[in-house]
């Protein structure tokens, strides 16, 4: 029954690989998951020349190989677009950095209302919203009801508790994916 266990492992690794590539493309992961891709390819090659007698296992294996191949084509296309500078999420991050650099040096204690502090807050909220939306998409979760206003309200609601827990009002937010679900995490600004 080694093939049954290997197919379960291959399916889990393939799902993890898909998630890690999506995280890499939206900027949550800094490096392309090449080691995980190599592990998945090794498992696929293990049964490439081996005849699988059980029809169910054979079908499952061929479907996973086809899925891997189609995702690999997609990933290669996105990587090529990133290298050419035409990838939309990559352009968004580049434009965001250009707007932040054009706004001048970062203020350590930004004012709460008006001026550059409010503009930086808006840019940060915009970044969080786009990262959160892309993370939800990569996890196949709906994004129809998501809006910057709802996200801002949720952050404002949680902020007093975070300030009390972390002991500072200088918070920085980031989007992470844990157990297949995107979350917004807060930490103190360094």
Image (cartoon, rainbow, N blue to C red):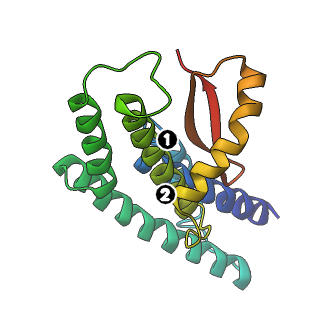
- Residue at the left extreme? 84
- Residue at the bottom extreme? 55
Q: Give the label on residue 134, or none.
A: 2
**Residue 62 spot, x, y in % from top left:** 57, 76
Q: Which residue is denoted by mark 1 in the rendering?
A: 28
- Quarter of the rendering containing residue 145: bottom right
**Residue 164 spot, x, y in % from top left:** 77, 23
Q: Is residue 112 visible?
A: yes
Q: Is residue 18 visible?
A: no
Query: Regarding mark 1 in the picture, which secondary structure is present there?
Result: loop
Q: Residue at x 63, y 26 (%)?
A: 187
Q: Nearer the viewer, mark 2 or mark 1?
A: 2
For the residue carrying disc 1, how many other residues have a C-alpha within 10 Å: few (<14), some (14-19), or many (20+)? some
- Residue at the front extreme? 114
Q: Residue at x 59, y 67 (%)?
A: 140
In the rendered view, tell whether residue 108 sits above or below residue 22. above
In the rendered view, tell whether residue 134 sits above or below residue 53. above
* Pick the front one: 67 or 54: 67
- Quarter of the rendering containing residue 9: bottom right
Q: Residue at x 54, y 57 (%)?
A: 149
**Residue 100 spot, x, y in % from top left:** 29, 33
In the rendered view, tell whether residue 41 sits above or below residue 121. below
- Residue at the right extreme? 1
Query: Regarding mark 2 in the picture, which secondary structure is present there?
Result: helix
Q: Which image quadrant: the N terminus?
A: bottom right
Question: Is residue 25 rendered to the left or right of residue 77?
Answer: right
Q: How many marks?
A: 2
* Pick the front one: 89 or 190: 190
Question: Is residue 172 rendered to the left or right of residue 13?
Answer: left
């Amino acid at each position: 029954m080694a093939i049954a266990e290997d197919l379960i492992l291959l399916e889990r690794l393939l799902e993890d690989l898909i998630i890690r590539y999506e995280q890499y493309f939206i900027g949550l992961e800094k490096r392309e998951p090449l080691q995980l891709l190599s592990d998945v390819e090794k498992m696929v090659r293990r049964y490439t020349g081996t005849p699988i007698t059980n029809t169910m296992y054979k079908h499952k294996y061929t479907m996973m190989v086809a899925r891997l191949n189609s995702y690999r084509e997609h990933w290669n296309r996105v990587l090529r677009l990133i290298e050419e500078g035409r990838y939309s999420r990559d352009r968004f991050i580049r434009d965001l950095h250009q707007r932040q650099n054009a706004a001048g040096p970062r203020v350590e204690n930004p004012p709460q209302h008006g001026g550059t502090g409010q503009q930086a807050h808006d840019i940060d909220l915009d970044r969080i919203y786009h990262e959160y939306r892309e993370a939800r998409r990569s996890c196949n979760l709906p994004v129809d009801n998501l809006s910057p206003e709802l996200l801002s309200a949720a952050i404002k609601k949680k902020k007093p508790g975070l300030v009390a827990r972390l002991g500072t009002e200088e918070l920085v937010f980031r989007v992470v994916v844990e157990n297949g679900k995107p979350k917004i995490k807060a930490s103190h600004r360094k």
